[in-house]
Amino acid sequence: MTRIAPANIADLPENTRKNLQFAEELMGFVPNDAMAMAHWPAMTQAMQHLVAVIYGPSEVEPMLKRLVAAVTSGAAGCRYCQAHTAHGAAKMAGGDTAKIAAVWEYQTSDLFNDAERAALDLALAAGTQPNAATDEHFARLHEHFSQRQIVEIMGVISLFGFLNRWNDTLATQLEDAPLAFAQANYSPDVWDVGKHKA
């Protein structure tokens, strides 16, 4: 059960309601983590802006960004964010469901190219505690990505560094759409809802 009850939308300032509407337009539902953040409207506004920048127009493919987020979240142990990012890869980035389901086999699967492997290797290393990122990870990234693109990848990893801690600590309840997607596309040895169930 979530450790902070979602805010009552009727009690929120109009600006905060607009930020939550942005989240709903982006994801297809208002996420429970945003509803908890809404108790502090300035945080909701800051998060909305950061998410808009991270997932807005960019040089890194939207699908790869969401796969980076999924691997970062899985490495950190946040099942809430792992389900959200997998759902987002399919529904918002038009990703191939087979590729999303195979993300934990990215090092050997033919569905992934060397550039994606380099990005996902960094996501896996950076998502673990203690952080396992090395100079070699960045050397491989530089073979495939520009400085700007690497900063975008780091932006995704860092955003989920925050969101993984937030949602895993608060045991945020997972919404129906990402829950159903994760259950349908991840095997039980890769993902389970754990503390995030209703």
Image (cartoon, helix red, strand yellow):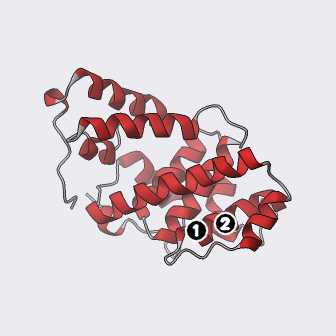
Specify whether 6 is left or right of 23. Answer: left
Q: Nearer the viewer, residue 141 or 196?
A: 141
- Per the image, the residue denoted by label 1 is 126
Tell me the kind of residue under disc 1.
Ala
Residue 182 higher or lower than 88, as above or below: below
Q: Nearer the viewer, residue 123 or 150?
A: 150
Q: Nearer the viewer, residue 105 or 167?
A: 167
Q: Residue at x 40, y 40 (%)?
A: 47
Q: Residue at x 50, y 78 (%)?
A: 130
Q: Residue at x 19, y 60 (%)?
A: 3
Q: Secondary structure at mark 2?
A: helix
Question: What is the quadrant of residue 187 in the picture?
Answer: bottom right
Q: CA distance from mark 1 to mark 2?
A: 6 Å
Q: Nearer the viewer, residue 42 or 104?
A: 42
Give neighbour class at mark 1: few <14, some 14-19, many 20+ (Cα, 10 Å). many
Q: Is residue 87 visible?
A: yes
* Quadrant, the N terminus: bottom left
- Per the image, the residue denoted by label 2 is 122
> Which residue of the protein is positioned furthest toward the top in this rendering?
14
Question: What is the quadrant of residue 121 in the picture?
Answer: bottom right
Tell me the kind of residue under disc 2.
Leu
> Which residue of the protein is positioned furthest toward the right in this rendering?
143
On the image, the x and y values in percent for residue 102 come to 66, 64
Query: Is disc 1 in contact with disc 2, using a CB cutoff of under 8 Å?
Result: yes
Residue 133 higher or lower than 20, as above or below: below
On the image, the x and y values in percent for residue 142 come to 81, 58
Question: What is the quadrant of residue 114 in the picture?
Answer: bottom right
**Count of number-bearing discs:** 2
In the picture, the disc for residue 187 is none
